[in-house]
Amino acid sequence: MTSGFVALDLKKATYPEEAYNYLNSIGYRIDVNANLARDNIPAFFDDLSITFEKRKEAIRHFFQTKDWQIFIGTITETDRLHHFFFHNALNDGEFHEAFIDFYKKLDMFLGKMYEKAMKENALFLTCSDHGFTPIKTEVYLNKWLMEEGYLEITVKEKGIETITETSKAFCLDPSRIYIHLNGKYPRGSVKDSEYQEIRNAPAQKLKTLSFNGEKVVKEVYFKEDIFKGPYAEKGPDIYVLPNYGFDLKGAFNRESVFGTTHFKGMHTHDDAHLFISHKHHNNNSFKIEDIAGIVTKYIH
């Protein structure tokens, strides 16, 4: 097992040691150098290609050298490509051909892996955990909470560490809002008896938030609407789902509610893809939670 982009050190992120020794020997990269997308675009595309080639090399190696019940290979280069250049890939934009070339390489690789799986009569499945769309604007929910009187911080650079006792709510990336409850947070001041009223107010106001005449928010959920299980109570008190193009952020140091950065593509929740090599009936209403059950059904 090798962790993905949140890992800082390949050795610490890989198990067992023999797997690390192999990955280190081929110059495996956990992730693309994202800073290059802002500072040196040609170098970014070179780095993207090298990282992808090492990813494929590692996947092929491990697939061929072990007898697997389940094998998972994760490709993150598509995500990086879309975050930084999705707007320029559409409608024959500047990087349209670069996208086409990358996806040809990706499709060829997937085709080869599919052929290997079919020879063993194995289930072959590809999926994404989200889709993509161009960004119209980023939306900084903590700045909005400040302007609406729900949040106060004393030092912008330290953000959440300096939330005051008078604060009623705060946001964590990407769009999770938590009520500043007494007893739950060190400086929380909202009483249990105030919870419903304080939670309802920003939820209703967010539904009217607009940018250039367009509604920013598609839907606002309370945690009991979308979370279940023994840890549901630990979920965000409010979850905000944006309309396409409005990238919700939890930054604490923004000067205005709306703004842009070097990110050009954002995640969408309802157009992820799923491909299954075996016929599988469920009326085409897949949810991401279904995938684990589909996989375990075919493990012998």
Image (cartoon, rainbow, N blue to C red):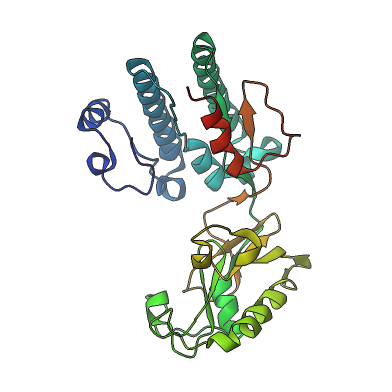
Residue 239: in sight, yes or no?
no
Residue at 47% across, 34% down: 75
58 in relation to 131, above or below: above
- 234 vs 219, left or right, is left
Q: Quadrant of residue 229?
A: bottom right
Q: Residue at x 63, y 33 (%)?
A: 274
* Residue 31 appears left or right of 103: left
Residue lying at 44% horizontally and 26% vertically, measured from the top left = 70
Where is residue 115 drawn, in percent x and y?
Answer: 53, 12
Q: Is residue 70 above or below residue 232?
A: above
In the image, farthest residue toward the right? 213
- Counting from the top left corner in percent of width and height, residue 220 is at 68, 66
- Quarter of image, res 168: bottom right
Residue at left offset 49%, top offset 82%: 181
Number of numbered markers: 0
Is residue 189 among what the camera can see? yes
Name the image quarter holding the N terminus.
top left
Residue 297 drawn above or below residue 234: above
Q: Residue furthest top?
A: 119
Give the x, y percent position of residue 122.
Answer: 52, 17
In the image as oriented, which residue stretches furthest toward the bottom? 166
In which quadrant of the rendered view does residue 198 lie?
bottom right
The answer to whether residue 141 is above or below residue 90 is below
